[in-house]
């Protein structure tokens, strides 16, 4: 333990921060003695399909469900150096997001722009002054409101840095923790603004401050106020119920029956859903069905009737009305996903 803290202290002594967006300059081996900014290729794409946008976060195996009705429009900025990935996305509709961090990386998530309706992650409120620490393989379920702009910094734990990133990150393997630290959050958001500004100055590439991300990640991993994981019982119950729903969307079991099958009361199940995704199980299942129907129609291999039936929505008139209300178009008008560069 003393050796670990000695390494942390010595590496911090070799680094001195300048006020410019928490950029790091120093004489240590991690900074090369001078500047730490690395210009790397980047892409900025705009999307009208949530599935196409969800695929952009490298290694996270993400899946989105559109929660809020209306036409969807989002964007995704991605840049990756040898050891650091920086991803900034924008959404104009509330989304349910599920996924898991890469097994060979530790990640930090901040809200570059916080939505007015807020956000939740693994059953906890997620605010502008928070940072989500996603350990290697850590899984998450999040609800982000319209107007959210989450920024993700992903750092390889197999990199060449002499900072003790890997041993600290591995302590958080399989977990996602909320760190309520406005100072660290603000520094990550400053880095986000710098990356976005560098794109605007010269589209096609961005400045990725590798050493700054490494030091900030170290600060995050060693923060004294690392938050506890969400209540495991509610999160695990929500995920079990969601898995049952996804396994067969055509089943129309009442919520009471779903709860009984999981060995809990209806009230307990509703509390778990409210805590994790801020809605009841009935509404969540309907959103799963509508989003599933949209995926089938987007793929182009199903008719409207086939997509509705396969998604557990057999009343075609009601399906068409609900679909139009939620996605802003009739199911017969849904085509292939649009991507606008």
Image (cartoon, rainbow, N blue to C red):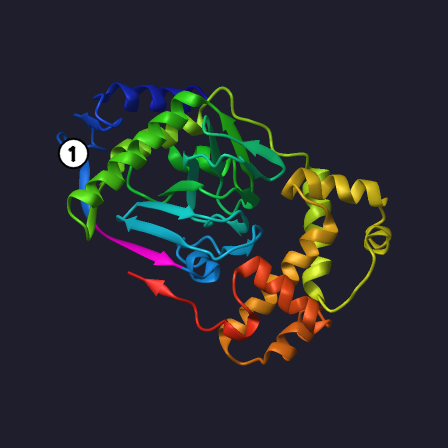
Question: What secondary structure predominates along the stretch shown in magenta?
Answer: strand
As for residue 84 lying within the magenta part, the answer is no
Quadrant of residue 192 within the rendered picture: top left
As for residue 45 lying within the magenta part, the answer is yes
- The residue positioned 39% from the left and 59% from the top of the image is 47
Q: Is residue 132 above or below residue 279?
A: above
Q: Residue 195, image x and y in percent?
A: 26, 40
Q: Residue 127, image x and y in percent?
A: 50, 30
Q: Is residue 175 above or below residue 328?
A: above
Out of 258 and 176, give the one closest to the viewer.
Answer: 258
| Residue 87 visible in the snapshot | yes
Please indicate whether residue 264 sits to the left or right of residue 13 in the image: right
Q: Secondary structure at mark 1?
A: loop
Q: Residues within 10 Å of mark 1 (few under 14, many from 20)?
A: few
List the residue tagged with mark 1. Answer: 32
- The residue positioned 45% from the left and 48% from the top of the image is 92
Please indicate whether residue 329 sits to the left or right of residue 249 in the image: left
State which region is magenta: 41-47
Looking at the rendered image, the quarter that the C terminus falls into is bottom left
| Residue 162 visible in the snapshot | no
Please indicate whether residue 29 sits to the left or right of residue 328 in the image: left
- The residue positioned 75% from the left and 39% from the top of the image is 271
Quadrant of residue 26 within the rendered picture: top left
Out of 3 and 82, give the one closest to the viewer.
Answer: 82
């Amino acid at each position: 333990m003393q050796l670990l803290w000695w390494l942390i202290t010595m590496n911090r002594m070799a680094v001195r921060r300048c006020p410019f967006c928490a950029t790091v300059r120093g004489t240590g081996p991690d900074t090369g003695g001078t500047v730490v900014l690395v210009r790397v290729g980047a892409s900025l794409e705009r999307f009208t399909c949530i599935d196409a946008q969800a695929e952009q976060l490298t290694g996270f195996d993400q899946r989105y469900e559109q929660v809020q009705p209306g036409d969807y429009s989002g964007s995704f900025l991605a840049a990756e150096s040898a050891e650091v990935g920086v991803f900034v996305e924008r959404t104009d509709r509330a989304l349910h997001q599920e996924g898991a961090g890469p097994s060979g990386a530790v990640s930090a998530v901040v809200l570059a722009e916080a939505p007015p309706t807020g956000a939740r992650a693994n059953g906890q409120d997620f605010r502008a002054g928070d940072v989500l620490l996603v350990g290697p393989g850590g899984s998450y379920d999040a609800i982000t409101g319209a107007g959210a702009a989450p920024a993700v910094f992903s750092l390889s734990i197999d990199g060449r840095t002499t900072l003790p990133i890997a041993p600290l990150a591995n302590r958080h393997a399989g977990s996602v923790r909320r760190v309520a630290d406005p100072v660290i959050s603000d520094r990550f958001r400053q880095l986000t603004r710098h990356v976005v500004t560098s794109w605007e100055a010269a589209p096609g590439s961005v400045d990725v401050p590798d050493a700054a991300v490494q030091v900030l990640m170290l600060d995050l991993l060693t923060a004294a106020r690392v938050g506890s994981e969400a209540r495991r019982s509610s999160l695990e119950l929500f995920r079990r119920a969601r898995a049952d729903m996804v396994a067969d969307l055509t089943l129309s079991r009442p919520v009471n029956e779903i709860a009984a099958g999981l060995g809990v009361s209806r009230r307990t199940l509703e509390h778990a859903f409210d805590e994790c995704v801020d809605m009841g199980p009935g509404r969540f299942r309907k959103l799963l069905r509508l989003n599933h129907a949209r995926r089938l129609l987007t793929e182009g291999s199903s008719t409207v009737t086939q997509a509705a039936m396969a998604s557990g929505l057999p009343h075609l008139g009601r399906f068409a009305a609900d679909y139009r209300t939620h996605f802003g178009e009739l199911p017969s008008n849904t085509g292939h996903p649009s991507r606008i560069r």
